[in-house]
């Protein structure tokens, strides 16, 4: 948890609650703290957004999460990879019964990590587009990221009440940071990612990123 008040409240329910240091504020830094500072070698970490209502497969059926989590980590081990996740698309037309290791976007809504302290640490200073940053960095470090292409969350994006928008002082500030972060990431990782402007969908129009799934290390 990120605040002292949350620590008090959650300790009423759970015994093992950790307060993230004040130096690690924002989703990117919190993820970095969990993997690089809090977790131990070979730990298996699942990070899940708190606004997910359901997790569905390409047939529209509810996913058995206990089974799926085990399957995902087994596949990571088999591929000798350390990061992966699911697709952020609840349209069965764009979902396939495949697992891929190319540079395809892994949603920040649900991510899987196997901690390897023998590899270079990956730190993230971004809030907006931190998921793209982790996609790129783990792909560069490990030679691939694992994505399940037939499981997706049912969630809300750009919720102006709570979450990152509230932390940043409103949607306008978040959209401004999105533009700045998009430029930084595209300039640093040329050929791996490009920006475009999303004019439709569940959230307001703003800059977005698209990974180059043909990119090779």
Image (cartoon, rainbow, N blue to C red):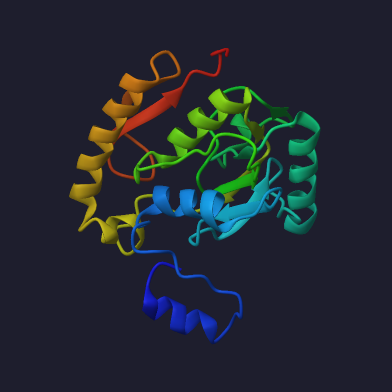
**Residue 171 picture location, percent across and down:** 23, 51
Q: Residue at x 59, y 30 (%)?
A: 94
Quadrant for residue 180, please give it: top left
Work out which residue is located at the far front of the displayed protein and give it: 118
Q: In this view, does 34 lie above or below 1?
A: above
Q: Is residue 83 above or below residue 49?
A: above
Quadrant for residue 146, please give it: top right
Q: Is residue 26 above or below residue 208?
A: below
**Residue 76 picture location, percent across and down:** 74, 37
Q: In this view, does 51 lie above or below 77?
A: below
Quadrant for residue 96, please give it: top right
Between 59 and 217, the one lying in front of the other is 217
Q: Residue at x 66, y 41 (%)?
A: 116
**Residue 72 picture location, percent across and down:** 74, 43
Work out which residue is located at the far bottom of the displayed protein and give it: 12
User: Which quarter of the figure is the C terminus placed in?
Assistant: top right
Q: Residue at x 61, y 80 (%)?
A: 15
Q: Is residue 157 left or right of residue 168?
A: right
Between 175 and 143, the one lying in front of the other is 143
**Residue 206 picture location, percent across and down:** 27, 36
Q: Which residue is drawn at 29% across and 28% down?
A: 184
Q: In this view, does 21 lie to the left or right of 107?
A: left
Q: Can residue 136 be seen in this view?
A: yes
Q: Is residue 198 visible?
A: no
The number of discs equals 0
Between 4 and 12, the one lying in front of the other is 4
Between 156 and 79, the one lying in front of the other is 79
């Amino acid at each position: 948890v990120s605040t002292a008040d949350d620590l008090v409240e959650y300790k009423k329910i759970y015994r093992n609650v950790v307060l993230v240091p004040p130096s690690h504020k924002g989703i990117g830094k919190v993820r970095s703290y969990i993997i690089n500072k809090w977790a131990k070698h070979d730990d298996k970490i699942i990070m899940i957004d708190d606004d997910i209502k359901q997790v569905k497969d390409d047939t529209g059926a509810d996913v058995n999460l206990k089974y799926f989590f085990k399957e995902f980590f087994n596949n990571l081990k088999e591929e000798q990879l350390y990061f992966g996740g699911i697709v952020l698309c609840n349209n069965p037309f764009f979902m396939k019964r495949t697992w891929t290791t190319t540079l395809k976007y892994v949603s920040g809504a649900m991510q899987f990590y196997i901690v390897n302290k023998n590899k270079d640490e990956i730190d993230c200073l971004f809030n907006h587009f931190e998921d793209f940053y982790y996609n790129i960095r783990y792909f560069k470090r490990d030679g691939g990221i694992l994505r399940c292409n037939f499981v997706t969350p049912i969630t809300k994006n750009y919720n102006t009440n709570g979450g990152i928008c509230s932390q940043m002082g409103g949607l306008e500030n978040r959209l401004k940071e999105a533009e700045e972060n998009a430029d930084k990431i595209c300039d640093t990782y040329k050929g791996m990612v490009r920006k475009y402007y999303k004019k439709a969908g569940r959230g307001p129009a703003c800059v977005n990123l698209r990974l180059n799934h043909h990119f090779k290390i």
